[in-house]
């Protein structure tokens, strides 16, 4: 698909310059403050989802590359970044935030080309990326605050927070820049160093971020990038003895594998995994706003959003009206090139993923769900599909399994008890959305829903200080604001006697 003429987007000549830049080199790992070729010289290709033609090539990392990166990060933790004063770390993070804003158009163009995410969404992601660093810059000085515990006039106990060491960060392909930096920023703010392993389907903004870190003149080894595949680069990172922290955003099966591989060394894990989040819409809801939010949540981000309300549980009395109005909206969603500012849904990330999502469309029909609209491939080039809407039942696979594409399954319910039972009858528990004018019912649902996060009469509006994470098969930890401190720092307790307290005299 072509990019339409518009004055609101990024200039076509700039896009072409970025495209040529991406095609002109093989992208290296970033280790110890330098860009370096892979130890084995192997290369992999990343595709443009809009065409499935080769966009760029990058070195394919292996255990040898992870070893160099982990040692560089460990050395910086011991002698470089880890020894900086908090106010110096704050200055660096603010500098990084400014450089992200400076290079915003290039970052947005790379993300659109590499991940297929649409420009209007990516611009918000880049703004959030800069905000991640500016937000945690303020935490650099206050994050290590502790508490005191005086005991009469005899003792003072106090606590301090200290950084842990090297943090291994493994990121997904759907929003690599934003999702990597909400881990990188708190890790650096609290004095840790980083080895980043980006997803092999969208590694290019990680390279650009490394270039920004180099421009910010971070101490060598503070931030490192090893590109490659999970088995070859991710697994050695998880297993490396110099990397005590591992954070992963990804699919639940991958999270289970990472947990098993990290168990031998008792590593600290923060796993943000899959979701099958419900939007529960009662008959007294503001239906117009509920439809706006539901359509946005499932079809924006190309449907590749972990917190998407991929199930809409709708009270029977308003079911048909809801379905008809959502179908009308879904049919009008603009599918197009991700760099076209008018596009609302771009191509899915990879031909393999497109086939997976289209496979679920077939599964839904085979299970007897009613396909109301969409679910077809669009065009013969790239990974485009028409947003799909099904009406089905909660036991169906399309209602139980994470599809991670623009596919909404609407499920009827009778009353509050039925809605709650169906909402919780799934292995995931990341997010939930409740639409009702009944304040007491909204609170009851918020308390009873098995989800890490619940929004009442709202779509997913993220506030950085609040905790982010899920329950059940959706994750193991909370990040965001001060909740990140529990993962990225160790808390030490120190006891000081104020006099000569009695000590037992054994063996005297």
Image (spheres, rainbow, N blue to C red):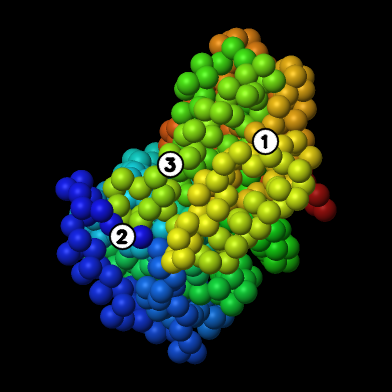
Q: Are marks 3 and 1 in contact (CB under 8 Å)?
A: no
Badge 1, how many Cα within 10 Å: few under 14, some, many 20+? Answer: many
Badge 3, how many Cα within 10 Å: few under 14, some, many 20+? Answer: some
Seen as rendered, the residue at the extreme right is: 507
**227 lies left or right of 88:** right
Frontmost residue, 91 versus 318: 318
Determine which residue is flagged by label 2.
2
Distance (Cα) linking label 3 and label 2: 17 Å
**27 lies left or right of 74:** left
Badge 2, how many Cα within 10 Å: few under 14, some, many 20+? Answer: few
Label total for image: 3
Indicate the quadrant where residue 344 lies: top left
- Whether residue 355 is visible here, answered yes or no, is yes
Q: Is residue 406 above or below residue 48?
A: above
The numbered disc on residue 333 is 3
> Tag 1 or tag 3, which sits nearer the N-term?
3
> Tag 2 or tag 3, which sits nearer the N-term?
2
- Whether residue 479 is visible here, answered yes or no, is no
Q: Position of residue 192 (x, y in %)?
A: 45, 57
Disc 3 on helix, strand or loop?
loop
Disc 1 on helix, strand or loop?
strand
Residue at x-position 50% and y-position 69%: 200
Frontmost residue, 463 versus 340: 340
Residue at x-position 59% and y-position 29%: 323
Q: Position of residue 150 (x, y in %)?
A: 56, 28
> Tag 2 or tag 1, which sits nearer the N-term?
2
The numbered disc on residue 391 is 1
Seen as rendered, the residue at the extreme bottom is: 40
């Amino acid at each position: 698909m072509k990019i339409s003429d518009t004055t609101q987007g990024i200039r076509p000549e700039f896009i072409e310059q970025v495209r040529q830049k991406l095609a002109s080199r093989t992208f290296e790992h970033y280790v110890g403050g330098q860009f370096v070729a892979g130890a084995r010289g192997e290369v992999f290709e990343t595709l443009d989802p809009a065409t499935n033609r080769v966009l760029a090539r990058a070195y394919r990392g292996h255990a040898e590359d992870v070893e160099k990166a982990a040692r560089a990060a460990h050395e910086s933790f011991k002698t470089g970044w880890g020894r900086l004063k908090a106010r110096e770390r704050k200055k660096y993070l603010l500098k990084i935030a400014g450089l992200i804003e400076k290079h915003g158009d290039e970052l947005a163009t790379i993300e659109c080309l590499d991940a297929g995410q649409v420009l209007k969404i990516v611009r918000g992601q880049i703004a959030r990326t800069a905000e991640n660093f500016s937000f945690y810059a303020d935490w650099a000085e206050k994050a290590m605050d502790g508490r005191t515990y005086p005991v009469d006039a005899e003792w003072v106990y106090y606590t301090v927070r200290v950084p842990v060491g090297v943090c291994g960060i493994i990121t997904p392909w759907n929003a690599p820049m934003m999702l990597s930096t909400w881990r990188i920023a708190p890790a650096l703010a609290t004095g840790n160093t980083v080895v980043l392993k980006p997803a092999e389907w969208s590694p290019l903004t990680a390279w650009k971020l490394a270039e920004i870190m180099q421009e910010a003149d971070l101490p060598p080894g503070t931030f490192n990038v090893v590109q490659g595949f999970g088995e070859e680069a991710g697994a050695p990172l998880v297993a490396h003895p110099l990397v005590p922290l591992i954070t992963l955003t990804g699919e639940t099966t991958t999270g289970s594998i990472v947990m098993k591989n990290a168990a031998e060394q008792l590593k600290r894990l923060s796993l943000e995994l899959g979701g099958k989040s419900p939007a529960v819409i009662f008959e007294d809801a503001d239906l117009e706003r509920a439809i706006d939010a539901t359509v946005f949540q499932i079809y924006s981000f190309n449907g590749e959003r972990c917190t998407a309300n991929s199930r809409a549980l709708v009270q029977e009395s308003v079911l048909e009206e809801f379905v008809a109005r959502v179908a009308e909206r879904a049919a009008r969603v603009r599918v197009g090139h991700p760099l076209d500012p008018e596009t609302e849904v771009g191509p899915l990330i990879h031909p393999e993923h497109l086939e997976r999502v289209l496979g679920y469309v077939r599964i839904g029909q085979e299970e007897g769900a009613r396909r109301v609209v969409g679910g077809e491939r669009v065009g013969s080039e790239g990974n485009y599909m028409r947003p799909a809407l099904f009406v089905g039942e909660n036991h169906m696979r399309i209602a139980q399994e994470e599809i991670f594409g623009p596919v909404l399954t609407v499920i009827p319910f009778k009353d509050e008890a039925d809605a709650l039972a169906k909402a919780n009858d799934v292995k995931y528990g990341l997010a939930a959305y409740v639409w009702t004018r009944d304040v007491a019912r909204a609170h009851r649902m918020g308390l009873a829903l098995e989800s890490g996060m619940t929004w009442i009469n709202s779509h997913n509006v993220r506030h950085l200080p609040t905790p982010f994470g899920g329950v059940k098969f959706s994750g193991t930890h909370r990040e965001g604001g001060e909740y990140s401190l529990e993962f990225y720092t160790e808390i030490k307790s120190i006891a000081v006697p104020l006099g000569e307290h009695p000590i037992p005299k054994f063996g005297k």
